[in-house]
Image (spheres, rainbow, N blue to C red):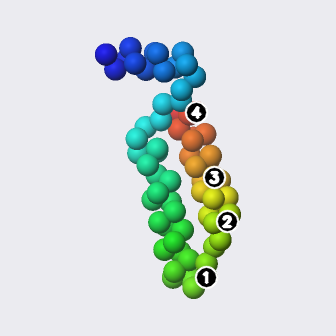
Amino acid sequence: MFMFVVQILAKKGVLILPDIMANSGVVMVSCFEWVQNIQGFMWDEEKVNRELKTYMTRASNIVLNI
């Protein structure tokens, strides 16, 4: 059944990622907050989103090329 669903989603162009990767954005933002707290500075939302996009894009490319 699982592979049947995967095939349907693939035909529709839906990208399937490992759950550990799909949930890692929250962990990364928590890490950003930790770094800001210990270094005593604050990023604005734009900076957080920019950094998150950079790290998630890099990680996605690595996983997709395996």
Q: State the residue position of label 4.
A: 65
Q: Secondary structure at mark 1?
A: loop
| Amino acid identity at mark 4 | Asn
Of label 1 and label 3, which has the lower sequence position? 1
| C-alpha separation, residue under disc 4 versus residue under disc 1 | 36 Å
Q: Name the front one of labels 4 and 2.
A: 2
Q: Secondary structure at mark 3?
A: helix
Q: State the residue position of label 1.
A: 41
Q: Name the front one of labels 4 and 1.
A: 1
Mark 1, Cα crowd under 10 Å, few <14 / some 14-19 / many 20+, is: few
Q: Residue at x 62, y 46 (%)?
A: 57
| Image coords of residue 21 (percent x, y) | 46, 45
Of label 3 and label 4, which has the lower sequence position? 3
Q: Secondary structure at mark 4?
A: loop
Of label 4 and label 2, which has the lower sequence position? 2
Say left or right for 25 vs 55.
left
Q: Residue at x 54, y 15 (%)?
A: 11
Mark 4, Cα crowd under 10 Å, few <14 / some 14-19 / many 20+, is: few
| C-alpha separation, residue under disc 2 versus residue under disc 1 | 12 Å
| C-alpha separation, residue under disc 1 versus residue under disc 3 | 20 Å
Q: Name the front one of labels 3 and 4.
A: 3
Of label 3 and label 2, which has the lower sequence position? 2
Q: Contact (CB < 8 A) between labels 4 and 2?
A: no
Q: Secondary structure at mark 2?
A: helix
| C-alpha separation, residue under disc 4 versus residue under disc 2 | 27 Å
| C-alpha separation, residue under disc 3 versus residue under disc 2 | 10 Å
| Amino acid identity at mark 2 | Lys
Relative vertical location of residue 55 with respect to residue 20 in this rendering, above or below: below
Q: Quadrant of residue 46?
A: bottom right
Q: State the residue position of label 3.
A: 53
